[in-house]
Amino acid sequence: MGLLEYADHGLFAPSKIAAAFRTTSEEVARSAGLGRDAIQRKERVRSDKTQRRLREMVEVITKTTPRFGSALIAYAWYRSEPLPGFSGQTAMQLVQEVT
């Protein structure tokens, strides 16, 4: 999947991301280091912070999908696999730390 497949009208859409990864929008928000309000309120979904976090998450998953063979497996890796050289943090934890 390309980045555009996770977007709707030029913005990353939590519902499309959730459908692609077979999860909920709330779980997508947590995976990106966002609160539930960030994906429930339209003005918050459009905010720079929300869009930046969703983009960062989707970019990591999109870039690792060829390695794992599917976006679903890449999403599982993003959430759970400790990365050597980053004090054992997962890609998800690294995205969540970005301000």
Image (spheres, grey):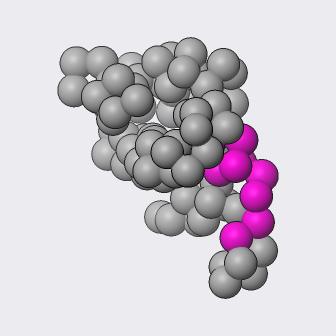
Q: Is residue 36 left or right of residue 15?
A: right
Q: x, y percentage for residue 40? A: 53, 20
**Residue 21 vertical position relative to residue 49 in the rendered view, above or below:** above
Image point (50%, 65%), residue name: 98
Which residue is at the front of the view, 41 or 19? 19
Residue 31: image quadrant is top right
**Residue 53 vertical position relative to residue 72 in the rendered view, above or below:** below
Q: x, y percentage for residue 63? A: 44, 51
Q: Main secondary structure of the magenta part?
A: helix
What residue range appears in magenta?
Answer: 74-83
Q: x, y percentage for residue 54? A: 45, 41
Which quadrant of the rendered structure holds the N terminus?
top left
Q: Say if the magenta span includes residue 4.
A: no
In this rendering, the count of numbered labels is 0
Q: Is residue 10 left or right of residue 16?
A: left
Image point (35%, 23%), residue name: 5
Residue 13: image quadrant is top left
